[in-house]
Amino acid sequence: MRNFQKTIESILMDDKRYGVGAYVFVRMALDFTVKRACAKDPRRTERHVSAAELLEGVRDFALETFGPMAMTLFEEWGVRSTEDIGQIVFNMIRAQALRKTDEDKLEDFANGFDFHQEFVAPFLPEGKKK
């Protein structure tokens, strides 16, 4: 974990858009996603997940972990869209904390889901859900 902390500190020297918590959360969400993917298919030997799988994992992990506070935390960390998740992932790839395949692209994270729809709307009173 110490090496990961140093990696985050290094990333933050070059890119201050996202808080430390965002990097820790994305790393934990990745582990959650890989574990879930391997549990769904025990024959799966590859630990790599696609952007779509990771975004689904980010959404589910955030809701399970933070519930109605998810959006507040994302805003605190500077994360407002799935594109931001992609930026965080690719910052970690550039810092060699994660690996990618030749098929993985930053654009894969564009328009994954609407943060308000996923993290705010489910917790609004019935008359305000829009």
Image (tube, rainbow, N blue to C red):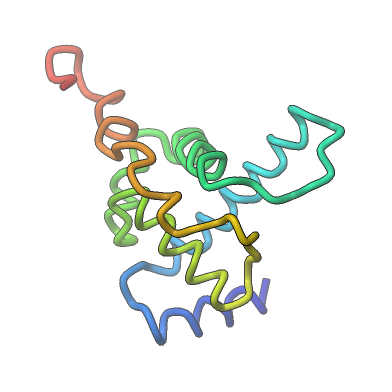
Question: Is 46 placed left or right of 110 in the picture?
Answer: right
In the foreground, 66 or 14: 14
Identify whether 130 is placed above or below 58. Answer: above
Q: Position of residue 9 (x, y in %)?
A: 49, 82
Total residue callouts: 0
Question: Which residue sits at x=35%, y=54%?
Answer: 83
Q: Residue furthest top?
A: 126
Question: Which quadrant of the structure image shows residue 42?
Answer: top right
Quarter of the image with the C terminus in it: top left
Q: Residue furthest front?
A: 102
In the foreground, 108 or 10: 108
Question: Is 112 placed left or right of 33 in the picture?
Answer: left
In the foreground, 51 or 126: 51
Identify whether 71 is placed above or below 105. Answer: above
Question: Which residue sits at x=74%, y=27%?
Answer: 40
In the foreground, 18 or 2: 18
Quarter of the image with the N terminus in it: bottom right
Question: Which residue sits at x=72%, y=41%?
Answer: 35
Question: Is 79 placed left or right of 57 in the picture?
Answer: left
Q: Position of residue 107 (x, y in %)?
A: 40, 54
Q: Position of residue 124 (x, y in %)?
A: 22, 23
Q: Position of residue 64 (x, y in %)?
A: 50, 33
Identify whether 100 is placed above or below 80. Answer: below
Question: Which residue sits at x=54%, y=45%?
Answer: 54
